[in-house]
Amino acid sequence: MYDTADVYGRSRKGWTEETIGRWFASRPEAREQVVLATKVYGAVGDGPNEKGLSAYRIRAQIEASLRRLQTDRVDLYQFHHIDRSVQWEEIWQAIDTLVTQGKVVYSGSSNFPGWGIARANEHAIRRGSFGLVSEQSIYSLLNRNIELEVIPAAQQYGLGVIPWSPLGGGLLGGVLGDKPTTGRRSSERIAAGVEKHRPQLERYEAFAAKRGVAPAVLGLAWVLRQPGVTGPIIGPRTSSQLEDAVAALEVELDETDLATLDEIFPGPGGPAPEAYSW
């Protein structure tokens, strides 16, 4: 799956979609081999209709995304954030029209709370609409909040869970001892994260070494092992990072391994409400 959004871009919003579109144009046969996903919600301009999930915005933005992507359809059109100012009847009316027109195949959510998934799909059920098929959430050993309600809601409604930032923004990729000069690891945010989680990261990297796998491979293998997860979003910058991601598919974690990782990075204690009421 190729995942992008209308607001992604190194130099300007839409740049990433344009890059994918040029790639499709140079390899027309590749389009049928790719599950293409993009998102709508974020502001692409300063006007009142250039942000959110109104029917007008959804219809206008899918046309803009299709032009940039140089394709006739988006396989997974995701709501990048919940929009509390728009009713779901309006959102699903717009999506149903796009599905009928063949411009969207499936729709999904991103960064939704559990109640947001439930509300969206209950409205879809009442309309006879297909509803959400996936939820893309931040999820890693360092951030396990979605285990409380998002994952249970996704499983209840049959959604696949697509974790983003599965390596904690790079912190689980093997950062101790590095001397970064450029890129994400050189940022103050990464440095602060290392200091905040240093004891955990030391134990984690030692465990990865004991298991004989790279820290990044271990982090991805753990995410893949979690209930409801269909596949994490990765953003490799080098061929070696891509090889690490693929290698995670071959790593088997037994119950002892999982218990060790739970001890290093404790989760919320299970799904809600058991995690906080029993």
Image (cartoon, grey):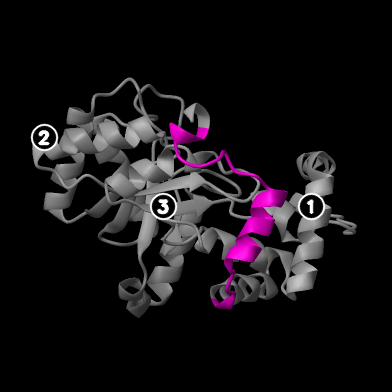
- The mark closer to the camera, 2 or 1, is 1
What residue would you read off at disc 2?
126
Q: Is residue 138 left or right of residue 172?
A: left
The N terminus sits in image quarter: bottom left
Q: CA distance from mark 2 to mark 1?
A: 47 Å
> Residue lying furthest front in this view?
278
* Looking at the image, residue 183 lies above or below residue 146: below
Q: What is the quadrant of residue 33 in the picture?
A: bottom left
Counting from the top left corner in percent of width and height, residue 224 is at: 51, 63
The 10 Å Cα crowd at callout 2, few under 14, some 14 to 19, many 20 or more, is few
Callout 3 touching callout 1 (CB < 8 Å): no
* Residue 235 in sight in this render: no
Residue at horizontal 32%, vertical 54%? 76
Q: Is residue 186 magenta?
A: no
Q: Amino acid at mark 3?
A: Val
Counting from the top left corner in percent of width and height, residue 70 is at: 34, 61
The 10 Å Cα crowd at callout 1, few under 14, some 14 to 19, many 20 or more, is many
Label of residue 201 in the image = 1
Q: Which secondary structure lies at badge 1?
A: helix
The 10 Å Cα crowd at callout 3, few under 14, some 14 to 19, many 20 or more, is many
Q: Amino acid at mark 1?
A: Leu
Q: Which secondary structure lies at badge 2?
A: helix
Residue at horizontal 71%, vertical 56%? 172
Total count of labels: 3
Label of residue 161 in the image = 3
* Residue 201 in sight in this render: yes
